[in-house]
Image: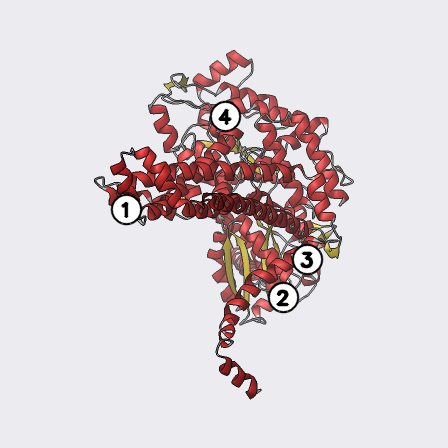
Amino acid sequence: MISIFKGLRGRGGNLRYLFHVPTLSFLFFITLIPFLYVINLSFRSYSFSIPGMTGQFIGLENFRRLLNEDPMFWHSISLTLVFTFLSVSIELGLGMGIANLLNQDIRGRRIFTTLFMIPMMISPIVVGLLWKFMLNPELGILMFFLKKFGFTLKEGLLSSGKTAFLTILFVDVWGWTPFVTLIILAGLQSMPKDPFEAARIAGANSLQIFFYIALPLIKPLIIIVVLLRSIDAFRVFDTIYILTGGGPGSATELGSIYGFRINFKFWDMGYGASYVLFLFLIVLIVTDLLFFFTQRKTYMSR
Amino acid sequence: MKKIIMVVLVISGLLIGSLSVAQAVPLAVKDKTYEGITLRYIAEAVPPTDAVLKLVPEFEKASGIKVEFEIYPYEYVIEKETTDLIGKTRIYDVMSVPYEHLGRYVEMGWCQPLEKFFENPQLKDPQFDWNDLIMTSVKLAGMWKDKLYGFPSNNCTHIVMYREDLMNNPIEKRSFKEKYGYELHYPSNLVQYKDQIEFFTRKKGEKLAGKILDRAFYGTALSAKRHPALYCEWMDFMFAFGGNLLDENGDPIVNSPENIEALEYYFSLFKYAPPGTKEYTWDEVSTIFQQDQAYMAVQWSDVAFGVEDPEKSKVAGKMRYGVVPRLVRPTSHYGPWSYLMPTASKHPEAAFLFIQWASSKEVQLKLAKMGMIAFRYSTYDNPEIKKMPILPDVVLALEVAQSRPRIPEWPEFSSSLILHLSEAITGEKTAKEALDVCQKDFERILRK
């Protein structure tokens, strides 16, 4: 026994692996074990509602049912992908524009930046409740102002499928553009000043400076922001659940909402596990594709 | 001499009578057999729970048993109970459960029948009086396959609430008779129900009861959000049309002709409701009434009290209540919560005493005086109760109450129902298509 310790200390380098143990065991117990449990569950028939389903092994039956017999699966996945793509693109576009603005020396920049960050700091549930009250057709403040300016809507924005989807998209953009702006602004402000001065002296205008100098320099940040926002947008739940509950009809039944329904309304845990694994798989594929395309570009630019 | 004897006899008779009423407690309570035990009770965050919370110190004093309440909103209660029962953590000794989960809880072995407690001479309340119970309520809320598992903890059911002041207004009565050819009174059937809703839908600038409206007034308000409120409301009309979700054998009949007719009738009411009605649950329906913007609607008997609160409601005192009118049968969609005792309850006898106490004549009367819906006839015979709003009309509704399926598969059923009804409301499907899909769903779920 003592010789082992002597050996560790003697080598010097191996002792550092001991310091990895707390972190690794944390990761192991908090992420790996539950993940393996979910995989196991997805092969079983387990429900908190139906007496006969107590965890029997049923192989790939859950997955077969998901892919072949569940139109809501495809519907929710496609809605989630569309939502993620649209929200991230809009947030990126707006975020870059606003970050550029805030990067310049205009009056009241600090105050405006602070105020602009507020939506990001509100908890998602409060955001949902806030907009739900404001959008109420009879009693909400939004409709009141729309009427004043002459727009009378036939029904509430959350009462029809298309407008409901656009509304939740809007609320997400409202809440998270500040986040994108913040990250890009940090990037812009930490860039070296020399290339910009050189370009300005050479006679380039603001747009050219932005596209040919600023953009390539903050590309790593953009990749990170897109990655973070994509993963988050894919998982969005609280705000949508409060605003529409997945409705009207199934117009806003995104992946997380349907997953929640399977697990906590139907109480069908086995089926829910298989659904959740699929979501995970899709996120994995999307992020891999993202890395693949962006790393390639970086290679080429080198 | 005779007079004095008479008086003495009467007084002693009264004294003995009052003594026997005062001693209407089980022996276990009188002897404080279970003193020192703490019960944990989980319930929904609604006024009936708060009312019981207010009265529970009496029980605690009399029996020596402490009762701790855990109060949460609707869906959170179900999640917490399920977690406790599945995980066998034995946290709760008494639970309040929505009655549609009764079948599920019994079949999963989660709650126990109460007969053996009633047969125990130490535990039973000699004055319980089974004949006094409104049996429709007890059967639907507390019995499964002929065994008794509990009693209603929140005995709410659907009623119609309407503006009595408008119905009795002479100007309106005259023009109604001109237009429809019969006297304006409480609708005896669903055709009259729709007539009146149509009649009272007015645009801004038109007259209502002789006054010019500065904003639109609506005949009704519907709770049509993609939410349990949707099927709760529609099922009233479904029952009134003679339809049902399951037949006597438990087979789905979701797309029966009666149901399709009921759904199409329900859709025809939308043009008389506020534009935002597709986002409403029962709470928003009440708010519209409080703001003096609607005439008549279906509502839960406990939520309806909100329109009688003078601080929040502009129409307090102007409302009246009734049973959902018949087309085939008068009806009310029953929606109670029940006291259930977990099989793994750590203190079953003490828990039983609590449930029995809450269901006793005295406590039910006290709860009713606070505005809660009781399930005993004696409560509604009480003169004080007769003078209160809503309650005298509810007892009629309780007697014709109809229940939704209480089987273990109900959670998935209700989810499917909500989804497809919502799709039909947004026009994605017709009434028949929506119910056809539901029928297929129900059949698939039952086959599993």
Disc ID at residue A40: 3
Q: Amino acid at mark 1?
A: Lys
Amino acid marked by disc 2? Glu
**What residue sits right under mark 4 in the picture?**
B273
Q: Position of residue A298 (x, y in %)?
A: 47, 45
Image quadrant where residue A36 sits = bottom right
Q: Earlier in the sequence, mark 3 or mark 1?
A: 3
Which mark's residue is nearer the viewer, 3 or 4? 3
Would you identify the image quadrant in which residue B334 lies? top right
The residue lying toward the viewer, choosing from B444 and A188, is A188
In this view, the mark in front (2 or 1): 1
Estimate the spatial distance between the alpha carbons at disc 4 and disc 1, rounded to whole Å.
62 Å
Q: Are labels 4 and 1 assigned to the same chain?
A: no
Q: Position of residue A197 (x, y in %)?
A: 26, 42
Secondary structure at numbered mark 3: helix
Q: What's the residue type where badge 3 is placed?
A: Asn
Q: CA distance from mark 3 to mark 1?
A: 55 Å
Would you name the residue on which mark 1 appears?
A193
- Closest to the observer: A160 or B417? A160
Q: Is residue B300 left or right of residue B431?
A: left
**Disc number placed over residue B349 in the picture, else none:** 2
Between A151 and B393, the one nearer to me in the picture: A151
- Residue B244: x and y, percent? 70, 34
The reply to whether label 4 and label 2 mark residues of one chain is yes
Q: Chain of mark 3?
A: A
